[in-house]
Image (spheres, coloured by chain):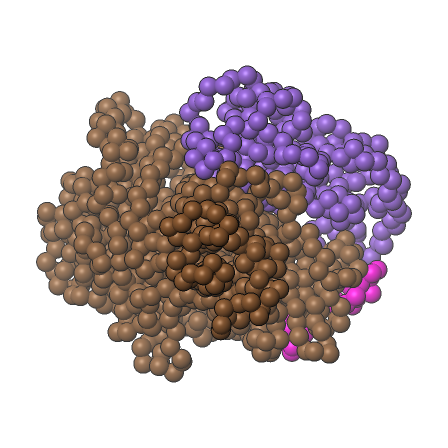
Chain colours: A brown, B purple
């Protein structure tokens, strides 16, 4: 795959297949469990709670310690003695350690870590750890938990415009309860950590398939009682998916790090699937009540939301951010100026939540778009028409809660979706189907897709007065280093830690254009080493930030190197640097032929920079390398509870056409159209991959995926036979279209697009099913055949 | 969760290594293995063939699929000792040191992999299908992939890629409904086709 076609300009925007693929296709991936970064690592098995809530009456590890091949055992008491509780974005009523101290609060919570010569012996010995539990009543109902001061993490209310007046003057008010259960992106590779404590230096090195460093590096270091300089996190070149879920790896950096520190040996741990389903991380469960105030002509006058986020047993950073991630886009695609939000966050006895694809978006748009569907039904206005009436039309647009929609063409996307779906024909088909007694429905979702989050948004959890105590936070910077070595090899380091999104290929395209070379000549590493990579406290793979700031940093660094190449070439060719053009691996004197006197190869320029510093133009340093950082503009800390929570806001319009089988309750998606505007597409092939992949996650969440618990808190979805992911035959064909309204805020005009369909699909399909079943109230997710069958003709 | 611990409490398990001979990707290996060593761990950690991935260890996700004497098997559900005398094929053996197989190329061109963790199992299983049923249709391919969890791609480009190889193998040259990805690949100068149809057995 290095034999790409001849080099030409304009690699950005091409549907270039990935350079990453070849190694993966040959089985030469380098995932965490494949690596032996230190010799002689011992293996950990984790003893975990079978209960959702219980007091630990007695823990006896003596038999385990005496077992064959065992190095030692780390207990919750050790963890408490050797570390501090993890910090989060808000104070928590319950301290969060890497292992349970005297009470277990969710199924799968670590109780002890057994370390042995190999994993088999570690598991043998783990079975010999005796734990006596006194089970306690679990809390699983977030709505009940708000009344418990030990469970309530935070409560805030926000008012924008005059929602009271809007509701007082409304002709029609609709609403309902829309609950979004916790689910997971379920990366196929689980967590993995290799931890090596150096007692002499007092440093911990942790190889782990974490998706950052970002802020969570600091959280892990602080829990370990280490300054950030003494926790070195290194991510492997490959990571088997994450979708946000691997942000929780930081908890195990601490746990396995403590095991290494206590036992004096390097320790490795690879999570198994049962551990992953029970205890890795889930999306945030949301219980929302929403009301919309409409005028008779369809104008949306006001919105009231009462949202309760269930973050599970502990407040895991960056929670309670899920509640605030969407804050700049609370009013979605619509012009409405009157908005009230009551935001409460509670602890329950479920697995801790944090990042999961969409992060707050699916949970927000299910009620917001559901409210629009209910409004359309009551007003007897077609839902696509109702959306169109209320769309934001002038850009830039500032939302009532402070978001900035810098550019867009919402109405154009909607028109395109209408045409692509054959909307009028679908409506006619629905009339015919209904006459025949079939349960046929159409659902719409219009979704503003925020990307490149503002580090400052999470401080909204605090009242404005107390926010002043901390240093202000804003922005979202990323770093990159570009190097050309003496042989002319081009290397780029970014710290965007992808899990399959193809950052390496896109960076190669961007660098290739800036240097005038073929992208196959650009070697890119996107994994992070916190001691040696260019990174910032924002660095990582979340909030669809790569195409804006990751690319931005790579471009800035490349431009610096290109400037130096032009300066040297100008010196050689007796011209000014700005007369030099880099193209086809050669520096050309602009406006002249291709003779020897008017060109010099990049390789030769690199050689000069390294071999002959004396021959360089006055004032130029030897070597060819640059590190640059880039932060997206227009982000600031919150003021008056208004915040531009994300740099960019793409747009998605989905139209779902479904039929529910009357006899079985089976849901069939007859047609699905998804039209996106993510600004300029840097690589349409990869963009489509994100859209279709995000669709599958949204589809799974709305149709089948959810973490289910029995009344006693038992986890019912603890294997892949119980937690059901969609298979290819389940997934409908999605018809997509992309419009490209460039972003004025990112260097190449791109907006993030990795999460939009995960946000839109649950809402669109839920709305279509409400329509099919003639419901004027929401249906609880997931929309399983059993649930739908019960509602038919109900 | 220590679910793998096989022994009754307090009754130390007596394990002795057993000598086995296997042929892995054409190379004969004699190894001494504990009876309870999983085939997946044997391949990955004894032989260093880390291309076989472990995604669930309960036989659902398909990431660890290899072929044992030509038959697809979940390496997490077999013990290494069960393969004594058998020929094992893993992802590393598909292209070996040569060019990518048509199926590997097709997946590349269709963007049929993102994180790549499920890919080795899918390559083995789909290669096996195409060997048995060279002209396998879309429904057969989808049925096959129902035993393989992919969380990145939404499956469609994987199905497209396998179908394309199947069509080429079946001698069809006309492009059908799912040629969009191929067109994308063309647009950037990549060869549009997966190469000579050849013997589909090469893919396995």
Please provide percent x and percent y for residue B1: 66, 55
Residue drawn at (74%, 32%), measured in percent from left and top? B68
Is B174 left or right of A204, judged from the image as shown? Answer: left
Looking at the rendering, which quadrant does residue A261 occupy?
A: bottom right
**Is A677 above or below relative to A548?**
above
Please provide percent x and percent y for residue A520: 54, 46
Instruction: Please identify the quadrant where the C terminus of chain A is shown.
Output: top left
- Please identify the residue farthest to the top as the structure is shown: B171
Q: Is residue A67 magenta?
A: yes
Residue drawn at (28%, 33%), measured in percent from left and top? A420
Task: Find the magenta span and give its range.
Answer: A59-83
Judging depth in this view, the residue of A436 and A217 nearest the camera is A217
Residue drawn at (28%, 74%), measured in percent from left and top? A639
Residue drawn at (60%, 66%), measured in percent from left and top? A612
Looking at the rendering, which quadrant does residue A268 occupy?
A: bottom right
> How many numbered circles are shown?
0
Q: Is residue A477 magenta?
A: no
Judging depth in this view, the residue of B151 and A23 nearest the camera is A23
**Is A592 above or below relative to B113?**
below
Judging depth in this view, the residue of A508 and A713 nearest the camera is A508
Specify whether residue B143 is in view.
no
- Please identify the residue farthest to the bottom as the structure is shown: A469
Is A295 left or right of A346, judged from the image as shown? Answer: left
Please provide percent x and percent y for residue A699: 42, 41
**Is A312 above or below relative to A441?**
below
Judging depth in this view, the residue of A396 and A282 nearest the camera is A396
Please provide percent x and percent y for residue A63: 79, 64
Specify whether residue A14 is in view.
yes
Is A37 left or right of A83, judged from the image as shown? Answer: right
Instruction: Please identify the quadrant where the N terminus of chain A is shown.
Output: top right
């Amino acid at each position: 795959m290095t034999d790409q076609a001849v080099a030409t300009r304009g690699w950005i925007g091409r549907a270039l297949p990935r350079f990453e693929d070849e190694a993966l296709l040959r089985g030469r991936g380098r995932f965490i469990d494949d690596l032996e970064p230190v010799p002689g690592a011992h293996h950990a098995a984790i003893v975990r709670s079978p209960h959702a809530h219980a007091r630990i009456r007695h823990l006896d590890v003596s038999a385990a310690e005496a077992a064959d091949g065992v190095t030692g055992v780390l207990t919750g008491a050790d963890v408490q003695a050797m570390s501090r509780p993890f910090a989060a974005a808000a104070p928590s009523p319950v301290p969060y350690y890497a292992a349970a101290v005297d009470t277990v609060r969710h199924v799968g919570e670590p109780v002890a870590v057994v370390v042995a010569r190999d994993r088999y012996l570690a598991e043998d010995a783990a079975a010999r750890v005796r734990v006596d539990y006194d089970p306690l009543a679990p809390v699983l109902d977030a709505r009940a938990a708000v009344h418990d001061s030990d469970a309530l993490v935070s409560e805030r209310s926000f008012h924008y415009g005059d929602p009271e007046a809007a509701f007082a003057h409304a002709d029609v008010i609709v609403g309902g309860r829309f609950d979004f259960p916790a689910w997971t992106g379920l990366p196929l590779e689980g967590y993995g950590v290799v931890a090596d404590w150096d007692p002499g230096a007092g440093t911990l090195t942790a190889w782990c398939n974490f998706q950052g460093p970002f802020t969570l590096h600091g959280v892990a270091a602080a829990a370990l009682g280490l300054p950030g300089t003494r926790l070195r996190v290194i991510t492997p070149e490959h990571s088997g998916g994450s979708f946000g879920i691997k942000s929780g790896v930081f908890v195990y950096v601490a746990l396995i790090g403590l095991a290494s520190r206590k036992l004096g040996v390097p320790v490795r741990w690879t999570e198994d699937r049962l551990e992953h389903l029970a205890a890795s991380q889930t999306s945030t469960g949301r219980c929302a009540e929403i009301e919309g105030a409409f005028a008779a002509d369809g104008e949306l006058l006001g919105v009231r939301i009462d949202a309760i986020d269930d973050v599970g047993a502990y407040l895991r950073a960056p929670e309670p951010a899920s509640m605030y991630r969407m804050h700049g886009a609370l009013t979605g695609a619509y012009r409405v100026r009157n908005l009230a939000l009551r935001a409460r966050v509670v602890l329950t006895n479920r697995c801790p939540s944090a990042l999961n694809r969409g992060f707050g978006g699916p949970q927000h748009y299910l009620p917001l778009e559901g409210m629009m569907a209910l409004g359309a039904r009551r007003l007897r206005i077609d839902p696509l028409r109702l959306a169109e009436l209320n769309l934001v039309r002038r850009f830039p647009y500032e939302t009532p809660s402070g978001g900035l929609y810098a550019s867009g063409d919402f109405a154009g996307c909607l028109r395109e979706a209408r045409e692509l779906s054959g909307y009028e024909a679908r409506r006619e088909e629905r009339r015919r189907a209904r006459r025949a007694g079939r349960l046929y429905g159409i659902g719409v979702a219009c979704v503003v897709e925020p990307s490149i989050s503002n580090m400052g948004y999470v401080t909204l959890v605090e009242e404005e007065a107390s926010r002043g105590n901390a240093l202000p936070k804003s922005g979202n910077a990323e770093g990159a280093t570009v190097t050309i070595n003496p042989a002319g090899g081009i290397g780029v380091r970014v710290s965007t830690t992808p899990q399959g999104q193809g950052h390496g290929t896109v960076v190669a395209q961007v660098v290739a254009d800036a240097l005038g070379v073929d992208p196959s000549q650009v070697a890119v590493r996107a994994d992070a080493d916190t001691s040696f990579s260019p990174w910032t406290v924002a660095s990582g793979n979340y909030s669809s930030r790569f195409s804006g700031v990751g690319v931005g940093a790579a471009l800035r660094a490349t431009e610096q190197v290109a400037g130096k190449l032009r300066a040297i070439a100008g010196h050689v060719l007796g011209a000014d640097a700005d007369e030099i053009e880099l193209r086809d691996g050669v520096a050309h004197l602009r406006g002249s032929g291709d003779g020897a006197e008017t060109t010099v190869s990049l390789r030769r320029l690199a050689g000069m920079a390294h071999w002959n510093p004396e021959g360089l133009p006055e004032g130029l340093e030897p070597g060819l390398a640059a590190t640059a950082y880039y932060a997206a503009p227009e982000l600031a800390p919150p003021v008056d509870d208004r915040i531009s929570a994300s740099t960019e806001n793409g747009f998605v319009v989905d139209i779902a056409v479904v039929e529910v089988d009357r006899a079985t309750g089976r849901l069939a998606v007859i047609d699905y159209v998804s039209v996106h505007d993510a600004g300029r597409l840097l690589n349409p092939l990869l963009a489509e991959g994100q859209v279709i992949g995000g669709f599958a996650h949204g589809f799974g969440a709305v149709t089948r995926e959810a973490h289910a618990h029995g009344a006693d808190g038992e986890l019912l979805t603890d294997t892949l036979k119980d937690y059901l992911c969609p298979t290819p035959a389940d997934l409908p064909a999605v018809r997509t279209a992309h419009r490209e309204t460039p972003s004025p805020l990112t260097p190449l005009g791109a907006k993030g697009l990795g999460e939009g369909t995960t946000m839109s699909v649950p809402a669109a399909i839920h709305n279509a099913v409400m329509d099919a079943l003639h419901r004027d109230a929401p249906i609880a997710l997931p929309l399983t055949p059993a649930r739908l069958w019960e509602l038919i003709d109900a | 969760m220590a679910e793998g611990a096989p022994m009754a409490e307090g009754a130390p398990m007596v394990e002795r290594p057993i000598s086995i001979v296997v042929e892995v990707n054409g190379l004969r290996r004699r190894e001494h293995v504990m009876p309870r060593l999983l085939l997946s761990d044997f391949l990955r950690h004894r032989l260093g063939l880390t291309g076989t991935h472990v995604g669930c260890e309960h036989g659902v996700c398909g990431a660890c699929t290899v072929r044992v004497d030509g038959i697809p098997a979940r390496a997490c559900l077999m013990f290494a000792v069960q393969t004594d005398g058998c020929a094992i094929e893993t992802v590393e053996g598909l292209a070996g040191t040569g060019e990518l197989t048509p199926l590997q190329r097709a997946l590349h061109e269709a963007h049929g992999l993102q994180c790549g963790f499920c890919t080795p199992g899918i390559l083995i299983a789909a290669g096996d299908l195409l060997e048995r049923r060279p002209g396998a249709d879309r429904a057969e391919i989808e049925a096959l992939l129902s035993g393989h969890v992919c969380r990145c791609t939404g499956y469609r480009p994987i199905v497209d890629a396998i179908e394309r190889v199947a069509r080429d193998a079946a001698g069809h040259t006309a492009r059908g409904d799912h040629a969009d990805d191929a067109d994308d690949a063309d647009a950037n100068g990549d060869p549009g086709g997966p190469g000579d149809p050849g013997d589909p057995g090469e893919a396995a």
